[in-house]
Image: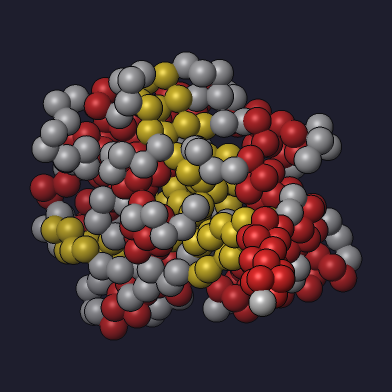
């Protein structure tokens, strides 16, 4: 009997000892993030997870903000999001996080579309639908400012990214700020006109993979390896590339030509060296300075913050803006550099 108990205990210990660590990654629909769905569904994530002896579960969350909230609440170890939302939700919420992959910046993938309007000034006193306090809000603020208007000149209506296109299409005098794929759906509506897009502010809306700073190095390396294997397929030629694009298009609810058009308005960093150069450049410092100032003015730092310096943002060279004793958002080029050097 004792021998049986001992064997049973040994089996349990063995299982616990050799079981792979499991990590959870959340993503939501966006042109620059569809590759994560492809990589997860076509064995690329598993391949890299196996290489590092871990398990990675990739989950699609249809509501973008909810995906970030779930990450902030501790239900996920990593999440796809933009630079501004990384600052204003998990960082301000006290979650120390690191951007390990800068995948692209929006170069027309975010836009302001309206019916019965020929210019942004035509929107004065009209309501505009958007995901409030997201990068859509930031882009709208930049658009209004560049056209001599203020936020008080329009009425903002908070609308989920899952619903914004269908609501805009149904409205006679609709106006909305959103991103692809819902932006493309809205643009295809009868009478819709694109009044402003992110190509007017290149490099300011950045799409990233954010990971808990204290997460296992194996997770960071595996995600980076999987990403750049997928980027190599997307930037290549031939059947494999065509099949990958077709898969991502279907995943996003677009046709292949529509998805190809969305990719053209996304400044994808297909090569890790491109991402590395961008992440270590001075422009990122300037962009995050503007983003944090906007976020503070909008009250996104909460009542306890007396200045934009409340949260520290650390860059690849270890320079910091904000409180160096309260760093909650970090840009780490380590893993992109490893990918560029073929060391993953």
- In this rendering, the answer to whether 282 lies above or below 135 is above
Residue lying farthest to the bottom in this orientation:
170
**How many numbered discs?**
0
Residue lying farthest to the front in this orientation:
1
In front of the other: 214 or 1:
1
Q: Is residue 158 visible?
A: yes
Q: Quadrant of residue 191?
A: bottom left
Q: Position of residue 201 (x, y in %)?
A: 44, 39
In front of the other: 331 or 259:
331
Q: Position of residue 306 (x, y in %)?
A: 14, 26
Q: Position of residue 40 (x, y in %)?
A: 66, 67
Q: Quadrant of residue 257?
A: bottom right
Q: Would residue 156 appear left or right of 330 to someone viewing this image?
A: left
Name the residue rendered at 32%, 72% in the picture. 164
- The way the protein has been coloured in the rendering is secondary structure
Name the residue rendered at 72%, 39% in the picture. 272
In front of the other: 246 or 96:
96
Q: Would residue 247 appear left or right of 242 to someone viewing this image?
A: left
Q: Would residue 150 appear left or right of 142 to someone viewing this image?
A: left
In front of the other: 132 or 331:
331
Q: Position of residue 122 (x, y in %)?
A: 21, 57
Name the residue rendered at 56%, 57% in the picture. 23
């Amino acid at each position: 009997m004792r021998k049986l108990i001992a064997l049973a205990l040994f089996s349990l210990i063995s299982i616990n000892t050799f079981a792979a660590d499991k990590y959870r990654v959340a993503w939501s629909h966006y042109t620059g993030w569809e590759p994560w769905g492809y990589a997860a569904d076509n064995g690329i994530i598993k391949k890299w997870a196996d290489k590092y002896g871990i398990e990675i579960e990739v989950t699609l969350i249809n509501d973008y903000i909810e995906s970030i909230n779930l990450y902030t609440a501790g239900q996920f170890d990593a999440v796809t999001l933009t630079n501004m939302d990384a600052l204003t939700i998990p960082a301000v919420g006290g979650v120390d996080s690191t951007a390990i992959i800068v995948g692209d910046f929006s170069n027309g993938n975010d836009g302001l579309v309206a019916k019965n309007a020929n210019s942004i000034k035509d929107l004065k006193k009209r309501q505009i639908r958007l995901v409030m306090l997201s990068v859509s809000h930031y882009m709208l603020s930049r658009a209004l400012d560049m056209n001599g208007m203020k936020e008080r000149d329009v009425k903002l209506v908070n609308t989920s990214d899952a619903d914004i296109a269908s609501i805009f299409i149904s409205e006679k005098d609709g106006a909305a700020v959103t991103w692809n794929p819902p932006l493309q759906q809205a643009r295809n509506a009868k009478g819709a006109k694109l009044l402003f897009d992110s190509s007017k502010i290149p490099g300011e809306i950045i799409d990233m993979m954010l990971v808990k700073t204290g997460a296992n190095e194996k997770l960071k390396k595996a995600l980076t390896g999987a990403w750049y294997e997928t980027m190599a397929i997307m930037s290549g030629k031939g059947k494999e590339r065509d099949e990958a694009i077709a898969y991502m298009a279907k995943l996003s609810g677009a046709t292949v030509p529509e998805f190809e058009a969305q990719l053209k308005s996304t400044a994808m960093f297909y090569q890790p060296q491109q991402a590395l150069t961008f992440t270590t450049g001075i422009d990122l410092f300037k962009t995050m300075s503007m983003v944090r100032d906007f976020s503070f003015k909008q009250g996104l730092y909460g009542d306890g913050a007396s200045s934009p310096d409340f949260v520290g943002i650390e860059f690849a060279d270890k320079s910091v803006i904000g409180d160096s004793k309260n760093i909650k958002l970090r840009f780490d080029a380590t893993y992109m550099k490893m990918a560029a050097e073929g060391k993953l």
